[in-house]
Amino acid sequence: MGHTLVEKIIGNKVGGEVKPGDIVTVPVDWCMIDDIMVPFAVQKFQEMGFAKVAKPDSVVLIYDHFLPATQVDDTRHFRVGDEFAEKYGIKHIHRTDGICHQLMTEAGYVKPGDIAFGTDSHTVTYGCVGAFATGIGYTEMAGILGTGELWVRVPESIKVEINGKLPKNVMSKDVILRIIGDLTASGATYQSIEFTGSTIDEMSIASRMTMSNMAVEAGAKCGLFTPDEKTCEYCNIPFDDSVKALMADYDAVYSKVLKYDAKDFVPVLACPSLVDNIHPVADAKGTKVDQVFLGSCTNGRLEDLQAAAAILKGKHVAPFVKMIVTPASRKIYRQALSDGTLQILSDAGCIITTPGCGLCCGRGGGILSDDEVVVATNNRNFLGRMGTSKVKIYLASPATAAATAIAGTIVEA
């Protein structure tokens, strides 16, 4: 019996074959701690009585949710993180560089075949390069800091196969939202989702990141792509035999297989207030909006900003709409500045902010009030996430978001 991609990755790390349901202890290649969880992970580390960090060079601290600080206590998180890093020799610290999930691959940390854990559920994003990556709590993170390893249960796998060419203005965000709608928010609980097919092969790494990022919204433990030449170019590594071996066997066993024809996808929305409440954009056409948000670890990359700029060029955001643009990293910000993308967005009336999580986590400006409507490109539309519990959040692709900002009502691009 063959093995799925997640079984290959975990098996390689433990030095033997594994099967779904096995509980194994894995060495951790990378662990990421974000600014929200730093004080709690440090406190648990101290309570557990560890005298040193087992593998300080594998630890990355990233300040992104609380930047710029909007509450007095935010700066305590930075102080605790800096003091911990200095005391235990942690060198990898990003204070203003962007969102943790963008940086963990962009900055050259996570590579194909790695095992990574982070104190944020969207750590699953790193599956875009063929790594087993998932979110954990601060207690588990404290354990990794002290020991350099963690136990995991090998997950079952769901195979999603998509073939063909996507229609115009259908982006990978539309694809993953449709899949989440089909699976439901709990349909992939503690399973690995493997994305395959000719459509997937043609996707950029940025588009794959969007899909891995949102795999957790169906309950998945990880969302995996088979690493290819594009992956290796992005990660600046050779496409050698060790990478080529990171693929599912032809006779791998899956708990479920979903097959799609790319031409059947249409622009969709996750409607208030559940991520699996998926409907075609056409169903909500004409809904008045107060704000549009373009950014987050889901859709704050250069191709996302460029897609929005292509629609906004020569036009202007509706006079009663605020459109906030937050690049996912400083590198992306500079790229978008260099190629004129930010100029187009600025000319169209967008508010361009410093790289970071921003409005996605309800911080950094743009909070909404009762009965306001926002169309956003991030990953969650839960009640109260972007303001009061009466805010209506629609999740959409960058193309849909940009077209909506111009019209002032929900429209297809």
Image (cartoon, grey):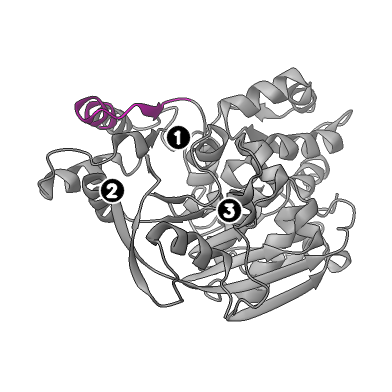
**Labelled disc at residue 148:** 2
* Residue depicted at x 58% and y 51%: 242
Horizontal and vertical percent position of residue 109: 48, 37
Start-end of magenta stretch? 81-96
Q: Which residue is mark 3?
A: 130
Residue 318 appears in view: no
Q: CA distance from mark 2 to mark 1?
A: 24 Å
Horizontal and vertical percent position of residue 262: 84, 64
User: Which residue is outermost to the front?
Assistant: 241
User: Which residue is outermost to the top?
Assistant: 338
Q: Residues within 10 Å of mark 1 (few under 14, many from 20)?
A: many
Horizontal and vertical percent position of residue 279: 74, 68
Q: Which residue is mark 1?
A: 64
The residue lying toward the viewer, choosing from 179 and 271, is 179
Q: Earlier in the sequence, mark 2 or mark 3?
A: 3
Classify 102 as above or below 119.
Answer: above
* Residue depicted at x 46% and y 59%: 12
Q: CA distance from mark 3 to mark 1?
A: 24 Å
Horizontal and vertical percent position of residue 379: 58, 53
